[in-house]
Image (spheres, rainbow, N blue to C red):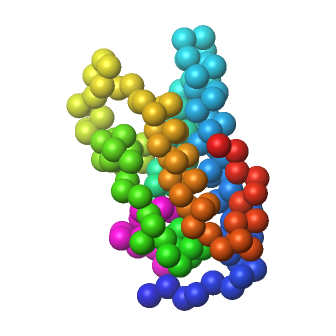
Amino acid sequence: MKSPRSIEELKEMAEEHILCEFNMIQDAANVVSRAHGTNGLLENIALESFLLHIRQVRDFFYGVRKNKWPDDTFASDYASNWESVQPDLPRVIKEHEERLDRQLAHLSYARLRYKGKEKEWPVDEMATAMAEVVRVFLRSLPQDRAAWFSGVRL
């Protein structure tokens, strides 16, 4: 069982790390779009960054079921009602969930399954879907905690 975090820890984590994760999804998606077809290296770096942030935010919102590490932070640390208002995992994220876990974090033979169009990632759709989950999260926060996320760019 996780030990409760102090208000100071929650605030620092929100303002320094969670806010950054939310914003990096949008920022990296924008770089992927701008670099598409012009700079393969930049596009790949931005894509990997985007996918990493999608994966971390997915686990922040939905990973409480896995709870692998006792010091992980979750949306329910901030919004006590999160499990009752939490939307379903977006379809586009669910469709790519195993691939996010296997291809991004592991050098595995599972990568061989993806060829041609199957290697592409629906970046815009994933960013849009996760932005909607962020909006639901922000609406579920008590006013004092919502202020910690005032720098979210959606």
At a point 63% along the width and 19% down the height, the residue shown is 34
* Residue 45: percent from left, percent from top: 58, 31
Res. 25 image quadrant:
top right
**Which residue lies most toward the top here?**
38
What's the magenta region? 60-73
Could you tell me if residue 108 is visible in this image? Answer: no
In this picture, residue 81 sits left or right of residue 103: right
Tell how many labels: 0
Quadrant where the image shows the N terminus: bottom left
Which quarter shows the C terminus?
top right
> Height in image: 53 above or below 121?
below
Judged from this view, the residue extending furthest toward the left is 113
Front residue of 25 and 46: 25
Residue at 70% x, 45% y: name it: 153
Inspect the magenta stretch and tell me whether residue 65 lies in it: yes
In this view, 19 is above or below 36 = below
Measured as percent of width and height from the top left, residue 54 is found at 50, 47
In this view, 106 is above or below 40:
below
Spot occupied by residue 11 in the image (x, y as percentages of width and height):
73, 72
Residue 142 horizontal side relative to residue 125, left or right:
right
Residue 134 is covered by the magenta coloring: no
Does residue 122 sit above or below 95 in this rendering? above
Q: Residue at x 76, y 65 (%)?
A: 147
Q: Nearer the viewer, residue 128 or 23?
A: 128
Residue 37: x and y, percent?
54, 11
Q: Is residue 90 visible?
A: yes
Q: Residue at x 46, y 38 (%)?
A: 126
